């Protein structure tokens, strides 16, 4: 058998010019950033994305992940109440202003972590689930590694400055995506605008996410700031049937964080169009079939292929197709025999499987005999009445 290859241009209909610059022209003032299209699994932008950096309060998302998993497993529920230790009460920075006489519910602690960015609430959760905050931080580190977050480690539950408190932008994006996809029943808390726990701390009751009120589809997740980390944000936005997750870090002010976050959301939704470039069942190539009851079989994709295409790439996308040729009968329908690699400007390639469109049975005996006879004749011409190798023509 041999591999046959071809290149074609996939026609993509009606591209709308959505911007005046190509997607690759985008940049950000953030020292590190990552932009990910959740709907299509496409990385749109990355800058210093795999460097383990101080995440500040953005690492509270990992504390929430641990709590959401405990809820999912039935180890706790939203009405469960946790005690507040002197250590938790003594936490500085942003807090819920808990004291040791409080017994907040899990639901209140979720809101306190997300909306109030409560360092005290994080310690309460850590001690309830891990016994001690140190033990909980080790649990966080091990769980992050198991989830594929290879550039993350934790020294505490709150994001308070600590030499082991490190996360990459890619890891934070992966974590945010997980919270959205795996725990949709809790995601609405991230868009909550305020949480005045027991009427305390009126100045700290508002959600710090600067995008929630802008009407651009932003609906979470978490800001962060320390002197070491600068200003950062893990955010997500939904417009139509597209969702993006983005992370920025190392900005110099709240204003810069808000401006960069809004710019990223606008860029991600305006610079790319989501298009179906291959339809399920559309024939992409034909493979010859040896000794079959049909001479060839069509190769198709099993499902529609929808991709993000840079908005100015109006002429379509290139694709390389390779397949085994010829196939040997019998051939089953839906048998994977090839692949298509789709190329887009300045974006990762996408590979899809190509399968046979229908079954091809073996040829009838007479056809198989004829084929076998032809092979024998080609290989042994002297034995079948042709000139012998040593003969002389008359």
Image: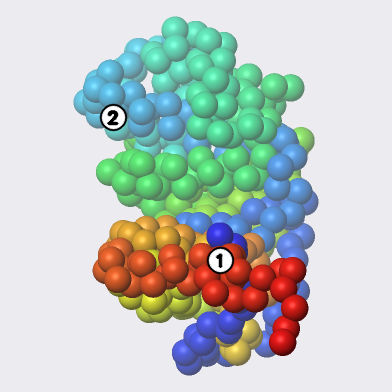
**301 or 78: nearer the viewer:** 301
- What whole-number distance in Å separates the C-alpha atoms at marks 2 and 1? 77 Å
**93 or 317: nearer the viewer:** 317
Q: Residues within 10 Å of mark 1 (few under 14, many from 20)?
A: few
Say which label, 2 or 1, has the lower sequence index.
2
**154 or 334: nearer the viewer:** 334
**Residue 151: image x %, image y %?**
67, 33
Q: Nearer the viewer, mark 2 or mark 1?
A: 1
* Residue 340, label in figure: none
* Residue 383, label in figure: 1
Which of the colour schemes (rainbow, by chain, secondary structure, one colour) is used?
Answer: rainbow
**Residue 279: image x %, image y %?**
38, 76
Q: Which residue is mark 2?
A: 72
Asked whether the viewer can see residue 288, the reply is yes
What secondary structure is marked by label 1?
helix
* Residue at the left extreme, as displayed: 79
- Name which residue lies at 28% across and 66% down: 365
């Amino acid at each position: 058998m041999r591999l046959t290859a071809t290149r074609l241009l996939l026609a993509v209909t009606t591209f709308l010019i959505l911007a005046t610059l190509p997607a690759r022209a985008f940049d950000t003032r953030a020292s590190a950033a990552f932009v990910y299209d959740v709907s299509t699994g496409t990385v749109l932008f990355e800058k210093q994305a795999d460097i383990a950096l101080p995440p500040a309060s953005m690492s509270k998302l990992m504390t929430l992940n641990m709590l959401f998993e405990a809820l999912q497993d039935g180890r706790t529920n939203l009405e469960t109440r946790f005690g507040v230790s002197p250590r938790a009460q003594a936490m500085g920075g942003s807090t819920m202003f808990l004291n040791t006489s409080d017994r907040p519910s899990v639901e209140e602690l979720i809101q306190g972590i997300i909306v109030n960015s409560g360092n005290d609430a994080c310690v309460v959760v850590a001690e309830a689930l891990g016994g001690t905050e140190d033990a909980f931080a080790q649990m966080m580190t091990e769980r992050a590694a198991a989830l594929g977050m290879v550039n993350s480690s934790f020294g505490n539950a709150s994001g308070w400055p600590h030499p082991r408190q490190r996360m990459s932008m890619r890891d934070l994006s992966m974590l945010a995506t997980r919270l959205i996809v795996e725990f949709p029943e809790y995601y609405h808390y991230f868009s909550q605008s305020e949480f005045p726990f027991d009427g305390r701390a009126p100045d700290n009751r508002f959600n710090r996410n600067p995008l929630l009120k802008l009407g651009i589809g932003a609906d979470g997740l978490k800001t962060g700031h320390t002197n070491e980390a600068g200003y950062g944000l893990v955010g997500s936005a939904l417009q139509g049937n597209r969702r993006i997750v983005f992370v920025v870090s190392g900005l110099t002010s709240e204003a810069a964080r808000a401006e960069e976050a809004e710019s990223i959301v606008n860029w991600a939704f305006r610079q790319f169009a989501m298009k179906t470039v291959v339809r399920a069942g559309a024939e992409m190539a034909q493979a010859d079939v040896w000794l079959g009851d049909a001479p060839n079989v069509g190769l198709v994709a099993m499902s529609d292929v929808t991709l993000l295409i840079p908005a100015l790439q109006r002429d379509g996308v290139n694709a390389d197709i390779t397949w085994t040729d010829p196939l040997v009968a019998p051939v089953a329908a839906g048998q994977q025999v090839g692949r298509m690699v789709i190329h887009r400007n300045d974006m990762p390639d996408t590979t899809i499987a190509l399968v046979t469109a229908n079954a091809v049975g073996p040829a009838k005996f007479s056809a198989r005999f004829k084929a076998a006879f032809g092979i024998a004749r080609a290989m042994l011409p002297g034995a079948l009445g042709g000139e012998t190798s040593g003969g002389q023509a008359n």
